[in-house]
Structure formats: C-alpha cells, structure tokens
Amino acid sequence: MVRISTIINKMEEFAPLEYACDWDNSGWQVRLLDDNIERVTVALTPTFDIVKQAIDNKSNLLITHHPLIFGKLNKISVSSQVGSIITTAIQNNLQIYSSHTNLDSTKGGVADVMAEMLKLKNTVPIEQINETTGIGRIGQLESDVKLDVFLNQLKKILKTKSLRITNPSNKQTVKNVALCPGSGSELIGKLKNIDIFITGDVKYHTAIDVDDIVLVDAGHLETERLILLTLKDLVQAFGVSVHIAEEKLPWDVF
C-alpha cells in the first residue's frame, strides 16, 4: 500500500500544476484523506460511469485528464451531473485528481507521447508557455512519406477506423508534422511550413478556411487516450494495482 499523497506528489513532479493554462482547473477535484491505497483507476473524463467503474474496481483514487469542476460551483446538488458525481465519490471514499493542460504540455505528456509514436524528430512546442515546454508539438519525419501511408499508420496508432481530413492543396507526401491532441484548432494560425496538422474537435468553418496544409480531425478521445498507459506506468511503479477505465465516444453513428 502507498499514501495517496505520494502518488500525487509524483504526478505533480511529472506534470507541474504551474504548467496548466490560467483558465484550467487541474489538481484536486474531490479531496478527502491521505489514505493508504492499493487500487487506482485512470481515465480521460470523470463521468458518472467512470466514477462507478472506479468504485466497482474498489479504487480509492481516480486520476483523470479532464477536470470534473470547471468555473464557479455554487452548490453541490444530486440533481446536477457534477453534484451527483461528487456526492457519489464522497459516499464511496473515492478521491478525484485531474491533470489537464499541464499534462498536455509537460515533457513526456500527451503531445510528446503522440509525437514519439509517430517517430517525429526535433520536436518543439507549437506555442511556448514556459522555458521548457508548451502546447502542441512540431516535428519532422525521417523522410517524405506518402500521405495515405502516413494516415493509415496514424489510424493504427490511435486505434481508430476513420479520420476526417481536408487536403485543399492536394498534398501527396508529408514530412513536417504538427499535432495537438484533444482540441487544438486555434493553433492553426501559428503553424508555418507544415505539411499536416493532427488534432480533434475541428469546426466546419475552420476546416473550410484551411488552404495549404492537410488538416486531420482524429478525434478528441482518440488523440488523448494514448496518455493513459503513461499514467498507468507512473502510478504502477508504487506497487499499486492500476485499472484503465473503459471509455467510449458520447454519440452513436447510424
């Protein structure tokens, strides 16, 4: 068994809270006691279903990427989604900790994991937020790669069956790659001399305004869930059992 504080100290050493954006709410979402624990659940989003999975797994700590609480919280009521999650967590001695934009930007975090899996070289942040790191990554492939070959490899890495792409300049090969797991469309204006940009949550008007790059909407969940194995390894090093929650997209396709 290990103290929860020991795990959280390691989390904050890996992804310091000062790396988080000003609007973010990384850190403790539901904080109880510094208990000894044997089981931890990791997930992207602390939905009610994920909290139930953590409880069923007999976890006392749920570590998520997305925060449970955003903005002002006036009251905790079981009639609201957030209030119901908080109440259920407390009733079952489940603490919730989130590492969001600090985990996106930190060295070895969400963006770096994807860049490494794509075998990008000479990676740098798209947007610098401190002396050592920042949001998104830009890097180069070893050599020019046919676009269809690269996209098929991307699908395998992300374990997805489809990608949404727009290629108005009809590029046939790519080498200079930019990426921002999750939702990073606002970074397009900062890209220079890039062949392809991979992100999620691309809006219609953003897509039709693109003119000189291949834009790939690979999905929010699909591009971020890669980090869960990193979190598992980080926590499992303390000898606790780590469960990766089962998550799915919030919509069905007919």
Image: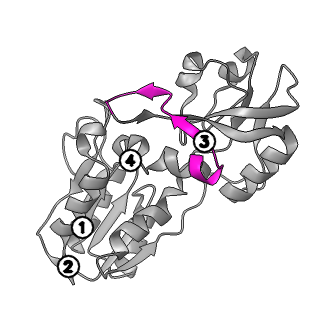
Identify which amino acid the numbered label 4 is placed on. Answer: Leu
Q: Earlier in the sequence, mark 4 or mark 1?
A: 1
Q: Earlier in the sequence, mark 1 or mark 2?
A: 2
Q: Is residue 123 magenta?
A: yes
Identify which amino acid the numbered label 1 is placed on. Answer: Ile
User: From mark 1 to mark 3, how far is it between C-alphas?
Assistant: 31 Å
Say what secondary structure mark 2 lies in.
strand
Please state the extent of the stretch shown in magenta in the rendering: 115-131
Identify which amino acid the numbered label 2 is placed on. Answer: Val
Instruction: Tell which of 54 and 189 is nearer to you.
Output: 189
x, y (%) of residue 231? 41, 63
Q: Which mark is residue 121?
A: 3
Residue 61 visible from this viewpoint:
yes
Q: Are marks 2 and 3 in contact (CB under 8 Å)?
A: no
Q: Which mark is residue 7?
A: 1
User: From mark 4 to mark 1, how far is it between C-alphas?
Assistant: 15 Å
